[in-house]
Amino acid sequence: MSSSLNLSLTDELRSFVDANSGDGTLYATPSEFVRDLLRQRKSQQEAQAIRGGILEGYRDALAGRVVEFDGDLLKVLKKAKS
């Protein structure tokens, strides 16, 4: 399912979009270019969240907040709840 979104752009941004879409570019239309930019930004935000989780785990490990893992994740999670 898709939906439309109308955007107002400054002349500078419109020129940027036009320069990156159409003949001789990777994107046939401005919409394709903008969609790809949005996908890239979404991916960056997801990666940032993952990096944050890794950093949090590293800090926990440095602070001694660790549990021994025997290969059974469900068991560890149940133990953590209680």
Image (cartoon, helix red, strand yellow):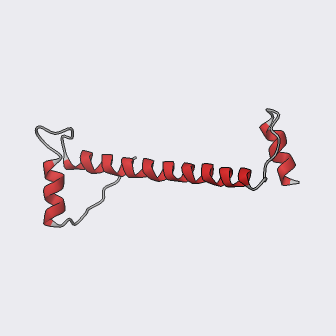
Q: Nearest the camera: 78 or 51?
A: 51
Q: Residue furthest top?
A: 71
The image quarter in which residue 63 lies: bottom right
Q: Nearest the camera: 18 or 68?
A: 68
Residue 12 percent across, percent down from the top left: 15, 63
Q: Tell me if residue 45 comes above or below residue 11 in the rendering.
A: above
Q: Tell me if residue 71 comes above or below residue 39 in the rendering.
A: above
Residue 5 percent across, percent down from the top left: 30, 59
The image quarter in which residue 8 lies: bottom left
Residue 72 percent across, percent down from the top left: 81, 34
Q: Is residue 64 left or right of residue 3?
A: right
Q: Residue furthest front?
A: 62
Q: Is residue 74 left or right of residue 49?
A: right
Q: Residue furthest left?
A: 23
Q: What residue is at 17 percent from the left and 45 percent from the top?
A: 21
Q: What residue is at 80 percent from the left and 38 percent from the top?
A: 69
Q: Tell me if residue 58 comes above or below residue 8 in the rendering.
A: above
Q: Is residue 51 left or right of residue 36?
A: right
User: Is there any visible trace of residue 48 in the rendered image?
Assistant: yes
Q: Nearest the camera: 67 or 30?
A: 67
Residue 52 percent across, percent down from the top left: 57, 54
User: Is there any visible trace of residue 2 in the rendered image?
Assistant: no
Q: Residue furthest right?
A: 82
User: Quadrant where the C terminus lies?
Assistant: bottom right
The image quarter in which residue 71 lies: top right
Q: What residue is at 17 percent from the left and 55 percent from the top?
A: 16
Q: How many marks?
A: 0
